[in-house]
Amino acid sequence: MTMGRDDLQAVTAGLVCAVVGFTSSFAVVLAGLRAVGATQAQAASGLLVLCLTMGLGCIVFSLRTRMPVTMAWSTPGAALLATTGAAAGGFAGAVGAFAVCGMLLALCGAVPWLEKLVERIPAALASAMLAGILLTICAKPFVDLPRAPWQIGCVLLAWLVTTAFARRWAVLAALAAALAAALVVMGVDGAFSRTGATTLVPHLEFVTPHLDATAMVAIALPLFLVTMTSQNLPGVAVLASFGYRLGLRGPLLYTGAAGVAGSLAGAHAINLAAISAALAAGPEAHPDRDRRWIAGVTCGVVYVALAPASAAVVAVALVAPQALLAAVAAVALFSTFAAAAASALEPVATREAAAVTLVVAGSGVTLGGVGSAFWSVLAGLLVLGVSAVALRRAASKQ
């Protein structure tokens, strides 16, 4: 089959989708995996599996449905992990939670009423929880700025300037600035000598999962919630906005099963792409809506091609100044934080409950070994329930 000029445009769109998706958020994924106890080898293994499973998902579903179906790792889920801290039972406990999250995703695909139940969770509270989680990460560069002013300043300036002229490439520009600053610092400190050749070779690092009740509540349930409400459901909505009717059953069964299998090698979760999905599904990808599936396939091929670089990416990231990695993660999440906060606080009826949810999630409070993400949703539901009672009492007195 020969490819025309417009088909090459779709290939380019898929390439951009994959490169932007990878470079804009791999720092968040690494931060999340490391925060819950992954070693360098385990983090590299997790990144490798994530690239392979989401790449294969893009290829298979785009070819089967003839739609530009793109998948991604759960960036909000990784952000959740970054603020959760060490899991009960160590990284094995986190892996057990990843596996349970995958099972829950697959169950939602197999049992339709479970999907409907998730949809009934107040969207404002789910968005508020995500915004609260992201707040801590987005604020990190400004907390670190006095200690590393020129390094973080370069990242923020590159992001700001590029946003004004080419918003799509702003995070990539910030990453390039961070890399340049890191090369200078690492050259002065001699950090390159601490990166051995063996650490650059990709390989799978299997972890035996440990099922711990605390980890289930602290990681599995919040990870499932943010992945469903901020990635899978919006991902279907983005495709629908371009005229594609993709059912959730197939993608949920695949991403859930891939999550269970991938967890054994350190991967946290994959899902339908949401924001980046528009790059492959929009008219910029191809004037013919029926040919945009090429962009989805290309995106998957590029993800698979990037998988072998996972070990090298992790090795360099871990010897680079951590303030730079945190700054890149923050700018990658600015737009996601803004969208989540706006969605949380827009409905007047649930605004107060959403505000409480956001504040509790952002506080980082840990009670009984369970992190703030879980408690924030409970706090929001409590305020929502109290508000409903108050409204009914006021109405009965009229």
Image (spheres, rainbow, N blue to C red):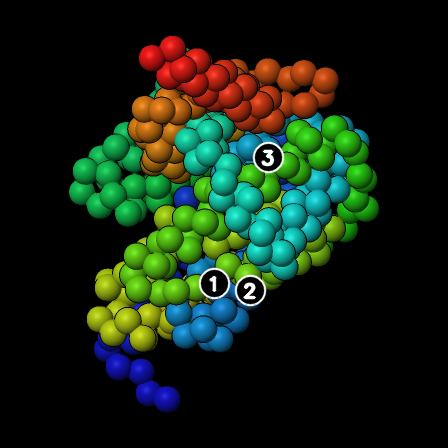
Residue neighbourhood size for the residue with mark 2, other residues' Cα within 10 Å, grouped as few (<14), some (14–19), many (≥20): some
Residue 293 percent across, percent down from the top left: 38, 71
Other residues around mark 3 within 10 Å, as few (<14) / some (14–19) / many (≥20): many
What SS does tag 2 mark?
helix
Amino acid at the residue labelled 1: Gly
Badge 1 element? loop
Q: Which residue is drawn at 22% across and 71% down?
A: 287
Which residue is situated farthest in the bottom direction here?
A: 1
Which residue is located at x 59 percent, y 38 percent?
Answer: 223
Looking at numbered disc 3 in the image, what kind of residue is underneath it? Answer: Pro
Quarter of the C terminus within the rendering: top left
User: Residue 186 in the image: x percent, y percent?
Assistant: 50, 33
Mark seen at residue 1: none
Depth check, front residue: 155 or 5 = 5
| Figure check: 73 above or below 371 | below
The residue identified by callout 3 is: 222
Image height of 286 relative to 389, above or below: below
In the displayed structure, 297 sits above or below 89; it is below
Q: In which quarter of the image is the N terminus?
A: bottom left
Q: Is 31 left or right of 395, judged from the image as shown?
A: right
First in sequence: mark 3 or mark 1?
3
- Amino acid type, residue under disc 2 in the picture: Gly
Cβ atoms under marks 2 and 1 closer than 8 Å: yes
- Mark 1 highlights which residue? 247
Mark 3 or 2, nearer chain start: 3
Helix, strand or loop under label 3: helix
Q: Name the residue under label 2.
A: 250
Cα–Cα gap, marks 2 and 1: 7 Å
Marks 3 and 2 sit apart, C-alpha to C-alpha, by 22 Å
Residue at (42% x, 52% y) in the render: 235
